[in-house]
Image: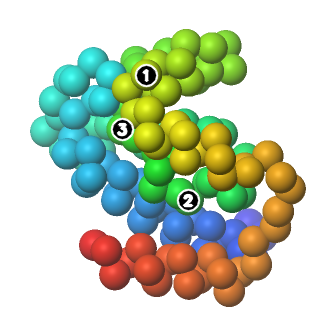
Amino acid sequence: MPKKTPRQKISLKLDNIVRTLIKKSDKKPCQKCNKIFKTLREVDWCHVISRKYARLRWSLTNGLTLCRKCHIWFDADNNKEGHPWFEKNFKNRWIVLQRSGYKEICKIDVWTLEEKYKRYKSMI
């Protein structure tokens, strides 16, 4: 198995910490159907705007917890129903995401990712 690069390592660490922060801030229920779960492992961390956009991949504004069924619904048909639902229910967050310039191509250096990780780590 090839050795992970520093960027891959910090990306995985950020994925894990943001997943935890999103799940803890949403207090366990699915944000769509309100199903309550016993543990945080039972809910998914869903990206509102695709994680392929580096500018928003680890943004706390860009995530929410959904059960597996609602996550599949949210992502279906390129978010055909998911985005309008999110805009209606999380209007302020939707505005922030739309104003973020997320479609502009950007590459975030490893140092910046490490600083972001440290900031998030202090929030736990």
Q: CA distance from mark 3 to mark 2?
A: 14 Å
Front disc: 1 or 2: 1
The residue at 63%/14% (across/down) is 80
Q: Pointer 1 and pointer 2: residues touching (CB < 8 Å)?
A: no
Assess disc 1: are there few (<14), some (14-19) or many (≥20) residues with their C-alpha within 10 Å of its C-alpha: few
Q: On the image, numbered disc 1 is attached to which residue?
A: 88
Q: Position of residue 35 (x, y in %)?
A: 20, 23
Task: Quadrant for residue 50, please give it.
Answer: top right
What is the number of the mark on residue 46? none
Q: On the image, numbered disc 2 is attached to which residue?
A: 58
Q: Position of residue 7 (x, y in %)?
A: 72, 74
> Could you tell whether 8 is left or right of 83 in the image?
right
Q: Pointer 3 and pointer 2: residues touching (CB < 8 Å)?
A: no
- In the rendered structure, which amino acid carries the disc numbered 2? Trp
Which element type, helix, strand or loop, lies under badge 2? loop
- In the rendered structure, which amino acid carries the disc numbered 1? Lys
> Could you tell whether 73 is left or right of 52 in the image?
left
Front residue (pair 36, 62)? 62
The residue at 74%/66% (across/down) is 1
